[in-house]
Image: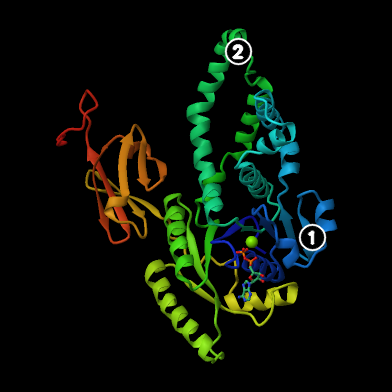
Amino acid sequence: MRGKNIRVILFAGKGGVGKTSIAAATAISSARIGYKTLVMSLDAAHSLSDIFDLNKGLMDKNKGEPVEVEQNLWIQEIDVQEEIQRNWKEVYQYIETLFNISGIDEVLAEELAIMPGMEEVSSLLYINRYVNEKVFDVVILDCAPTGESLRFISIPTTLEWYMKKLFKVERLFTKYARPVVQRIYSVPLPDDSYFESLRYLFERLQGVEDLLTNPRITSARLVINPEKIVIKETQRAFMYFCLYGLCVDAIIINRILPEGISDVHFDRWKATQSRHIDLVKEYFSPVPLFKVGLFGDEIVGGDSLAQLSKMLYDNLDPTTRFSTENPYKYMKRGGQYILNMRLPFITKEDVELSKSDNELLVRIGGFKRNVLLPRKVAHYAPLGAKLDGQNLVVTFGGEYDEEGNQEGEGRS
Ligand SMILES: Nc1ncnc2c1ncn2[C@@H]1O[C@H](COP(=O)(O)OP(=O)(O)O)[C@@H](O)[C@H]1O
Ligand SMILES: [Mg+2]
């Protein structure tokens, strides 16, 4: 048995590529090896229970809690309504009140008060709990389609930032502003229970970022199909996973036409697929590639999932860490610190760097990330950044003068 070293494996990719099937297949072989395994669906359009061929009544009865499917195997579909009752009551009520007084229809206000991110944060709460309480050996996450799963991975970073920077300020603001604001406007300010509930949520999220960015614990596996648009979208996802410090340990190419099919109609498809498979190798190397052929039938139930897993991992333990190379590396050379970031697919024009205090801000397109620098590194100014293959190498070493300006820096 795996013992106390929990393993978290996250499956992400574009809609319809086979994430849920592959997550379920991975879970079934993990459970059959003997690991106590949970597979959790983060996609609001849950299909896990359908793939395991379970009746919906059983899922509904469990109100979004784990349901045992076979020995060592549980599935969980997050139910946002239940999560609101469990975790978000005060926050939800406050937002609902705001919508209500702004004259929005009551039913619509209830719907609107379900904020984007509540599901993701709820699942992070579960993950943290399962890890701390050592409930499972393996937790497998069936993510929502790419866009939303990117939001999911960015949440711990964003929350930590919010916690540090905004939380205290906002609370102070309401403390002093309440008497004034309440006299002038009719908009209610959140009361203490709102903040108390948020504080409690944050508390329970402590450590989740470290967990997700530890490649010994968490791996992300990207599922793709050998099609141009899918590969493009996944390229971007890969870049952001790297940026957020999540280790991608496998690229899974699903739905490859089997060799045996020979037909004029499919020959063109096979040629196209094989071209794209070569492209995948160029794009994602050195991350290991796994291939799965197109099934002869729908994938439903334990037997076909086990067959899918065999096709995918052959006889390997599916919980193996296929790669543990973290996208970030710090090095010290001479008097300089070097931050090495694996950022595949970027070109120089895409990257914007800036630094304030102990944070390095990296912007790529619409995404940005605050990289909290080790104290020692933060002491120095960035001297420069250069692209070295798929690595962005940032050198820190310039001292600051008394006014906080960088010495020897050519300003224009
Ligand atoms: N290798 C495959 N061969 C045949 N059908 C597949 C394969 N992988 C997935 N499917 C089917 O494709 C559909 C979408 O798969 P699913 O796992 O739900 O994708 P996602 O979770 O990425 O949206 C399902 O009907 C599934 O049975
Ligand atoms: Mg799915």
The kind of secondary structure element at disc 1 is strand
Q: Is residue 12 above or below residue 155?
A: below
Q: Is residue 10 above or below residue 193?
A: below
> Looking at the picture, which amino acid does disc 2 mark?
Tyr
The kind of secondary structure element at disc 2 is loop
> Looking at the picture, which amino acid does disc 1 mark?
Glu
The CA distance from mark 1 to mark 2 is 52 Å
Question: Which residue does the image show at 50% across and 52% down from the upper left?
Answer: 214
Question: x and y percent of residue 276 in the render?
Answer: 43, 75
Is residue 286 among what the camera can see?
Answer: no
Locate residue 297: give its quadrant. bottom right
Question: Foreground mark, 1 or 2?
Answer: 2
Side (left or right) of 72 relative to 276 = right
- Image quarter where the C terminus lies is top left
Decide which of tag 1 and tag 2 comes sooner along the chain.
1
Report the residue marked by disc 1.
68
Characterize the local packing of mark 2: few (<14), some (14-19) or many (20 or more) Cα atoms within 10 angstroms.
Answer: few
Q: Is residue 300 above or below residue 118?
A: below
Report the residue marked by disc 2.
185
